[in-house]
Each structure stands twice: as structure tokens, then as C-alpha cells.
Amino acid sequence: MHHDAGERPFIVIWEVTRACQLVCTHCRADAIRSRNPFELSTEQGYKLLDDLASFGTPRPLVVLTGGDPFERPDLPELVAHGASLGLSMALSPSVTPRLTREVLVELHDAGAKAVSLSLDGASAATHDAFRGVTGVFDDTMDAARMVRDVGYRLQINTTVTRDTVHELPGILKTVLELGTTLWSVFFLVPTGRGKLLNALTAEDEEEVLHWLHDVSDLVAIKTTEAPHYRRIALQRAGVDNLDSAFPVGPLRAALRETTACLLTGDEPRRRMPRPPIDVNSGRGFAFVDHVGLVYPSGFLPISVGSVHDRPFPEIYREAQLLQELRSPDLFGGRCGHCEFRTVCGGSRSHAYAVTGDPLAEDPSCDYQPVAGLIPATLQDRTASPST
């Protein structure tokens, strides 16, 4: 980033509603069928957007999510208000009958520039089971083409679990065929309905991150709840023989073999890999839920304030937990000792989900800090939860 993450966020996710007609097995929000009457109103939403714009240039990116944001009838007004303030507005809808060309055109005309859609399996059987609705895979393919045709940038979001990890090469092939601008790979955090799914082991997550970097010259890639992707990008920079420096395990070998088979003859266009942006929970990133509570992340359910009580910029800059999350020397275990802590810091959401302490060591990271690079002033934190 080109600005102080403690002064202003790079991106803010606003959960405009928790209502959604899907029943996704990994849902962070434990979404509901009907809208909550205590959702931020249109006027309160305008005030939140005003607050986000008050940060000045560079203003945060704003993603309107849910639930399903298309459940809100005032969504075009919210998008138009944000766009009029100079905010870059993006949408993250569910693929339901509400996602129509007519609505997409209306929202694009209002000022929305990007749409993200979820694709969690390489086939209808896998994706539909993940989303809880038969036929949603085919509908997602149609929606993705429609999003591109209307003129949006398309982002594909993929949640990876131990049960779906081998489908990543097939999803990559679809991502390329759809002309995706950005592929965002979510690493499962055991929260909400996601507690019922199988997360990758730390060793396998490391293998997947190396594979993602292998293919990052095919499509821009970002990782969610796996900030150690930045550490891997730095470690691999300038290394001539990557397989010697980072021995390939069985999972990465299998992913590579499947990728080679699926992309044979396609000769996809190569590009310069997208540098992973240095944001993390509370550090360049924040989440506002449907009733106005502010969190470091949607996957880290510790509220740091409400926009009903304090302006968002004040909460972001002054909340104690957010300040702690921006101070990696406070992190526990390997994360606090790691030479990459200022550009990674580990998944704070995963640390909290497993240990109850958002500043604890991230158990989803397999890396061992290099001896001799640990500052003598750092001490191990206790395991007591932060407030």
C-alpha cells in the first residue's frame, strides 16, 4: 500500500443485509431468509459512506456484501451515493433469481464497477452441494458471462477445504475461460457454518499457496485469511530453482499434474504476477455488519464499536484491538517472532477461531522463523484473550 494502514483502510466490506436465499455450507454469516428490521437504513447507509469518503484520497474500496446485497431494494441508491462521493463501489451478490441483467445494468449505471461471484467447485455436483441449491453452478456460469457483458470487472471467490482442494486446477481453468480479473481464494476459517467443514492442514495450505504462486502469471490472485502468501512471494522472489529451494510435496505435485493436463493446448496468456497487497484484519481492512457493528474482519467476530455510536474513521483509528492488530510485535508464538511479521502477521481470524486469542500464533501457517532474526526484545504472549 502507498498509505499508512493505521490512518485509513484500503478496503471496507459492508454487509448491507444478512438475508440470502442460499444455504452455503461455509457461510460466515449464518445467513437468514428474511431481512433484519434493525439493518442500517438507507440514511444510515449514506452516513456510513460519507464517513468512508471522509478519509480522503486514496479512499477505501467499498464492497457491498451480505447475505445477498441484492435483497436490499435501495441498493442502487446506496451505490449511486457512494460513487458520487468518489468511492470505488463493488458488489458481492449471491447467484439467485434476483441477479438479473436488468439489475446489473441499473447498478452499473449507478456507479458499481466490479462484481464478485463465488465458485467453490469445478463441477455442478461439487459447487451445488457447497451452495445448498441444485442448479446454482450453471446459473453462476451464466451470471459471470452476463457480468462481463454488462461491463463489470469480474472477481471469482473460491473457498478451499480439504474436501475440495483437488478441484482447484479445474476451477482455475474456468476462471481463465470466464475472463476473470481477479481470483480470490478463501482459506476456510472454522467460524459460522464453516465449523462443520474440514480446513486444510498447515502443511497442505503451504503447498496450495506455492501452487497459487506457480499459476499467478495466468490470472491475478489474492488470498483471504492466508496472508502468508505474501511471505511465500517474498521467499520465492529471485530464486532460480524453486523446486530445490521449496521441495514439492504430494499435494502440490498432484495440483501441478492436473493443471498441466487441463491447460494442455490452451496456451493461456502469461502476465506479470500481481504483488500480494499488505492488508490484514484491522490493518488496511475492516468489516461493517448489517446492524452497524464494526469488526476487524467478517471472520473475526469481535466487535470494536458501532457506527451508531461513533464515526467509522474514529473507530478504525482508535479501537484498541485494531491498534493491537496493527502491532505485529504483540503477536504470540511464531507470528510474533517471525521475520515476515510486518508483511504477513498470520491469519488473525484463524488464530482467534482456534485459540480464542486474536493475537495468538496462527496455527494455519507451517513456517518456522529463521533463527538469529528474532529480535531479543520480543517476548512470548500469554494465551489470555484480548478484549
Image (spheres, helix red, strand yellow):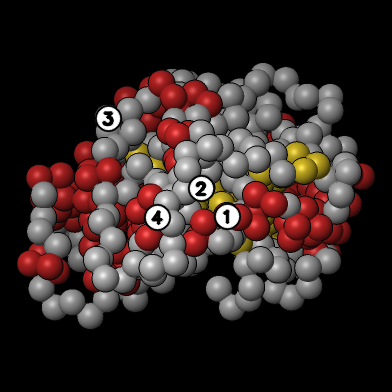
Label 1 vs label 3: CA separation? 31 Å
On the image, numbered disc 3 is attached to which residue?
163
Left/right placement of residue 303 relative to residue 263 reads right
Q: Can the viewer see residue 303 in this picture?
A: yes
Q: Amino acid at mark 3?
A: Asp
Quarter of the picture holding the N terminus: bottom right
Label 2 vs label 4: CA separation? 9 Å
Mark 1 vs mark 3: in front: 1
Q: Residues within 10 Å of mark 3 (few under 14, many from 20)?
A: few
Q: Amino acid at mark 1?
A: Leu
Label 1 vs label 4: CA separation? 12 Å
Report x, y in % for residue 353. 48, 34
Q: Amino acid at mark 2?
A: Leu
Q: Residues within 10 Å of mark 4 (few under 14, many from 20)?
A: many
On the image, numbered disc 2 is attached to which residue?
359
Determine the image quadrant of residue 371.
bottom left
Mark 3 vs mark 4: in front: 4
The local secondary structure at tag 4 comes to: helix
The local secondary structure at tag 3 comes to: loop
Label 3 vs label 2: CA separation? 29 Å
Q: In percent of the image, x 57 and y 55: which residue is there?
A: 325
Q: Mark 3 vs mark 2: which is more N-terminal?
A: 3
Q: Mark 3 vs mark 4: which is more N-terminal?
A: 3
Labels 1 & 2 near each other (Cβ < 8 A): yes
Label 3 vs label 4: CA separation? 27 Å
Q: Mark 1 vs mark 4: which is more N-terminal?
A: 1
Disc ID at residue 325: 1
Disc ID at residue 144: none
